[in-house]
Amino acid sequence: MIFKAACPECRGRFELAAGALRLAIGASDRTTFYSFTCPDCGSAVRKPAGERIVELLTGGGVRTLRLHSTV
């Protein structure tokens, strides 16, 4: 599956394959995000992932890391 993405650094817009994205699911909205490396400028990009984004990314085969609380 292909996903549309944008880089906040260089403002590039591009399409990424599921393998180029990573999804981290934490205990709260603040700790749930997806990340990728911008193919245009090489910046590491991290963006918040709401419930709908999580659904789309997991359904599209994006690798997922579940973060566990230590408390």
Image (tube, rainbow, N blue to C red):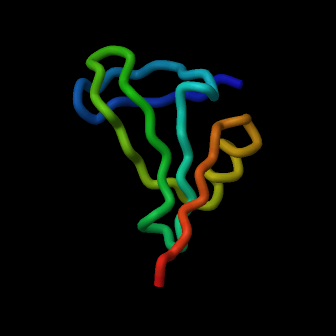
Residue 46 in the image, given as x and y percentages of width and height: 38, 44
The answer to whether residue 56 is above or below residue 9 is below
Residue drawn at x 60%, y 58% is 66
The answer to whether residue 13 is above or below residue 8 is above
Residue drawn at x 50%, y 73% is 28
Q: Quadrant of the N terminus?
A: top right
Residue 19 in the image, given as x and y percentages of width and height: 61, 26
Is 6 on the left-hand or right-hand side of 69?
A: left
Q: How many marks?
A: 0
Q: Nearer the viewer, residue 45 or 3?
A: 45
Residue furthest to the right: 59
Residue drawn at x 47%, y 84% is 71
Residue 43 in the image, given as x and y percentages of width and height: 28, 28
Is 61 on the left-hand or right-hand side of 18?
A: right
Residue furthest to the front: 70
Residue furthest to the left: 9
Residue 7 in the image, given as x and y percentages of width and height: 34, 30
Residue drawn at x 42%, y 67% is 30
Residue furthest to the top: 40
